[in-house]
């Protein structure tokens, strides 16, 4: 059953809370197939995973690809709580994701609206639909909470 964007973004926010509990920058992601079924989830964990590529989007793409038995996630939508970075926009294109929905913008490294819009570049032969600002406020609050606590712990 296909639900609205907010429904799936709440699932992505649950993943972001797992990252927060693990002491990682709280970003979460969910991949939903064409029938509206969540098939992959992930949260940001580069520190704990000792893996610079372990962003929420990449974790969710890997999880979805394993579930489908296919690296191409043709009819899928990726929901993520933060605007994707350079690496993740590339991974999203390689996975042939149909649509990306994100919550809050990332002014420093966001590659969808903040620093650039990589998805709009004419040299890619794959088009990705984008939608930003879905449940931006709770996603931003989680990030602010993380950085506030970290400043307190490490002045
Ligand atoms: Zn990323």
Image (tube, grey):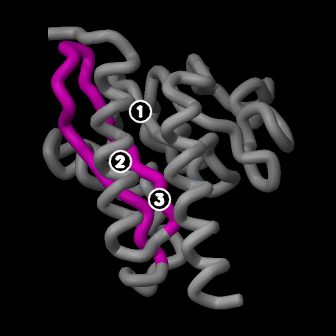
Which of the labelled discs sits on residue 103, or is there none?
Answer: none
Please say whether residue 66 is visible from this viewpoint: yes
Q: Residue at x 45, y 32 (%)?
A: 96
The span from disc 3 to disc 1 (Cα, nearest Å) is: 17 Å
Marks 3 and 2, how far apart at CA: 17 Å
Q: Quadrant of the C terminus?
A: bottom right
Mark 1 is surrounded, within 10 Å at the Cα level, by few (under 14), some (14 to 19) or many (20 or more) other residues, namely many
Q: Position of residue 109 (x, y in %)?
A: 76, 53
The outermost residue toward the bottom is 154
Image quadrant of residue 32?
Answer: top left
Q: CA distance from mark 2 to mark 1?
A: 8 Å
**Does 70 sit above or below residue 10?**
below
**Precedes in sequence: disc 3 or disc 2:** 3
Disc 2: CA contacts within 10 A as few (<14), some (14-19) or many (>=20)? many
Magenta-colored stretch includes residue 86: no
Residues rendered magenta in the picture = 25-46
Which mark, residue 78? 1
């Amino acid at each position: 059953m296909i639900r609205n964007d907010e429904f799936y973004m709440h699932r992505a926010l649950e993943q972001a809370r797992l990252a927060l509990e693990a002491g990682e920058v709280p970003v979460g992601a969910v991949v939903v197939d064409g029938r509206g079924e969540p098939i992959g989830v992930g949260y940001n964990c580069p520190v704990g995973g000792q893996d610079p590529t372990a962003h929420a989007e990449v974790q969710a793409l890997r999880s979805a690809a394993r579930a489908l038995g296919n690296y191409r996630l043709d009819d899928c939508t990726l929901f993520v709580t933060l605007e994707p970075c350079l690496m993740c926009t590339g991974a999203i294109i390689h996975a042939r994701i149909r649509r990306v929905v994100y919550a809050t913008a990332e002014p420093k490294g966001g590659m969808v609206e903040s620093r650039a819009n990589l998805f709009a570049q004419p040299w890619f032969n794959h088009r990705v639909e984008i939608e930003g600002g879905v449940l931006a406020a709770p996603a931003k609050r989680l990030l602010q909470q993380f950085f506030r606590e970290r400043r307190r712990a490490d002045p």
